[in-house]
Image: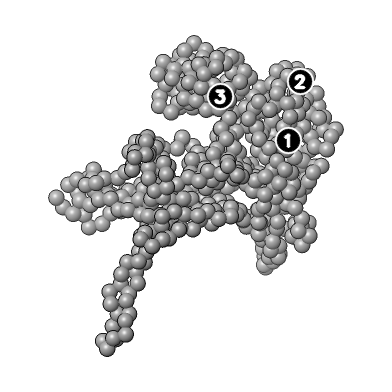
């Protein structure tokens, strides 16, 4: 056995598992179940581990020397920076937002026979639902399809499935939208805000919530409106059985009758900060692998673990001509080291579904900052282009200390705050005036790649800074600070500060 003299960073790895109760995983300390470990792919770490606090006795004595310090406290925390793909941070974002993702319909079929997917539950699946398969062996089962029949908690039927008796682990189908009946959907722009109207389709059955985004129209002429402005991304303001109203749109919608058209509406899963009993605090074991201490036992991997780790801060970084990335920090109650003989906690680690990183040149669908309007779904944007932007979430988590406890026995979450900064190219004084006048502003940022997309939406913000930056031989820029607030002051249904829509499938037109 030869002890190694160094361990390179390139052999480390990071994974997390949700705890059953703060500080304990499923299967630990009498908790039922088995932990589910999921991988992360950090670019870098920030203060990961436990900081030992010591106090050195310093009695009055003739030697004029201090005594050896005594351990009095432990501050456990950790931070990472990671590039964003569609699914790389979806699970951990539930912890950041203190909320559950609102899924539209997700199942892992036990088999595909004839024209049906065999499933244990059909919750969220309706006749007319658009579903997208993922990770099946047969490519035909991964295609976008329309549900033709549903047998409750038994099967979901589609026209073009391929027999697959034993699908791979994690092969799944998701609801990604709906296809209305022929001529069922029209556009009505005669009221205060534009809306889709229906005769047969009941919008309230689709699982859509106020404030989320949808994409109207597919890739063929028969499943989208003739008027281009009536298609595209829209934010939902209100939902009724036969009326879906929008308060944000790519362009000004116009009244149109959908004669002969089978209009498609694409929507996704939703994550937003919740209120009251819907707030869910999650805690995690976050384990970093540290390699083997000797070359004779390469399988004996060392590790260090953050225990009782609660996500505290999340910062979305949108730089120019770079990769979209995020900083994530945890506040933990304890940390532990595990030697090679003990081995790491993590087993059967699940990697995110394969997706490419978003870049900030060609994958940015929209960054739109505009005044809140109750009558105009497509108000003029305050700027055309930005050079960079950051959005920061802070849960203001603090550890709870007590006598007899090294580390913390619990943590307390404070006010959920969201703020940001962006720098825009100046073109007129409208944005500067909006800062001075404390105008109600709304911001949304959309990223689309490979028929999947994310939209971050902030229904109400106030602007700060607004001092023009003028330098020789450079364009004038406008730095803006943004403080986000609950959108309930805009509309009662928008009682959140931030909402993310995860489009598991978007048409190529997006």
Looking at this view, name the residue that lies furthest to the top. Answer: 114
Residue 509 position within the rendered picture, expressed as x and y whole percent measured from the top left = 65, 31
Residue on which the image places disc 3: 123
Q: Residue at x 35, y 54 (%)?
A: 335
Q: Residue at x 69, y 34 (%)?
A: 232
Crowd tier of the residue under label 3, counting other residues whose Cα lies within 10 Å: few below 14, some 14–19, many 20 or above: few
Residue on which the image places disc 2: 199
Along the line of sight, the residue nearer the viewer: 287 or 144: 287
Residue 322 position within the rendered picture, expressed as x and y whole percent measured from the top left = 54, 50
Sequence-first disc among 2 and 1: 2
- Separation of marks 2 and 3 at Cα, in angstroms: 24 Å
Residue 258 position within the rendered picture, expressed as x and y whole percent measured from the top left = 77, 22
Residue on which the image places disc 1: 238
> Left or right: 73 with respect to 158?
left
> Left or right: 362 with respect to 239?
left
Which secondary structure, mark 3? loop
Sequence-first disc among 2 and 3: 3
Q: Residue at x 61, y 45 (%)?
A: 275
């Amino acid at each position: 056995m030869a002890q190694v003299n160094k361990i390179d960073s390139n052999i480390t790895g990071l994974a997390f598992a949700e705890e059953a109760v703060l500080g304990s995983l499923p299967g630990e300390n009498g908790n039922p179940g088995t932990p589910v470990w999921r991988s992360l792919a950090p670019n870098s770490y920030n203060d990961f581990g436990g900081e030992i606090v010591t106090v050195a006795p310093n009695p009055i004595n003739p030697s004029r020397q201090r005594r050896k310090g005594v351990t009095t406290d432990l501050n456990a925390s950790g931070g990472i920076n990671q590039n964003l793909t569609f699914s790389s941070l979806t699970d951990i974002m539930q912890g950041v937002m203190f909320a559950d993702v609102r899924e539209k319909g997700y199942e892992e079929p036990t088999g595909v026979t004839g024209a049906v997917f065999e499933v244990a539950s059909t919750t969220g699946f309706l006749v007319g639902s658009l579903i997208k398969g993922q990770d099946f062996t047969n490519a035909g089962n991964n295609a976008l399809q329309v549900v033709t029949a549903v047998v409750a908690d038994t099967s979901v039927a589609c026209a073009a499935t391929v027999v697959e008796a034993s699908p791979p682990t994690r092969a799944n189908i998701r609801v990604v939208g709906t296809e209305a009946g022929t001529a069922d959907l029209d556009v009505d722009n005669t009221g205060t805000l534009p809306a889709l109207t229906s005769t047969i389709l009941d919008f309230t059955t689709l699982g859509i919530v106020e404030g989320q985004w949808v994409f109207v129209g597919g890739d063929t002429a028969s499943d989208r409106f003739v008027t281009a402005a009536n298609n595209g991304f829209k934010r939902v303001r209100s939902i009724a059985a036969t009326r879906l109203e929008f308060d944000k749109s790519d362009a000004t919608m116009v009244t149109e009758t959908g004669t002969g058209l089978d209009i498609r509406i694409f929507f996704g899963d939703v994550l937003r900060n919740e209120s009251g009993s819907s707030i869910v605090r999650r805690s995690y074991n976050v384990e970093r692998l540290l390699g083997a201490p000797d070359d004779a036992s390469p399988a004996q991997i060392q590790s260090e673990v953050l225990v009782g780790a609660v996500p505290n801060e999340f910062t979305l970084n949108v730089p120019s001509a770079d990769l979209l990335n995020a900083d994530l920090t945890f506040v933990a109650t304890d940390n532990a080291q595990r030697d090679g003989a003990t081995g790491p906690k993590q087993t059967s680690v699940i990697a995110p579904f394969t997706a490419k990183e978003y870049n900030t040149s060609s994958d940015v669908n929209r960054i739109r900052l505009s005044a809140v309007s109750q009558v105009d779904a497509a108000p003029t944007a305050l700027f055309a282009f930005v050079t960079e932007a950051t959005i920061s979430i802070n849960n203001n988590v603090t550890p709870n200390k007590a006598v007899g406890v090294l580390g913390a026995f619990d943590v307390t979450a404070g006010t959920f705050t969201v703020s940001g900064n962006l720098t825009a190219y100046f073109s007129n004084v409208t944005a500067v005036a909006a800062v001075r006048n404390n105008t109600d502003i709304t911001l949304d940022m959309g990223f689309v790649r490979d028929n999947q997309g994310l939209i971050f939406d902030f229904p109400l913000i106030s602007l700060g800074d607004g001092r023009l930056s003028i330098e020789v031989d450079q364009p004038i820029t406008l730095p803006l600070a943004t403080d986000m607030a609950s959108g309930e002051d805009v509309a009662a249904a928008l009682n959140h500060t931030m909402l993310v829509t995860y489009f598991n499938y978007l048409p190529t037109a997006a």
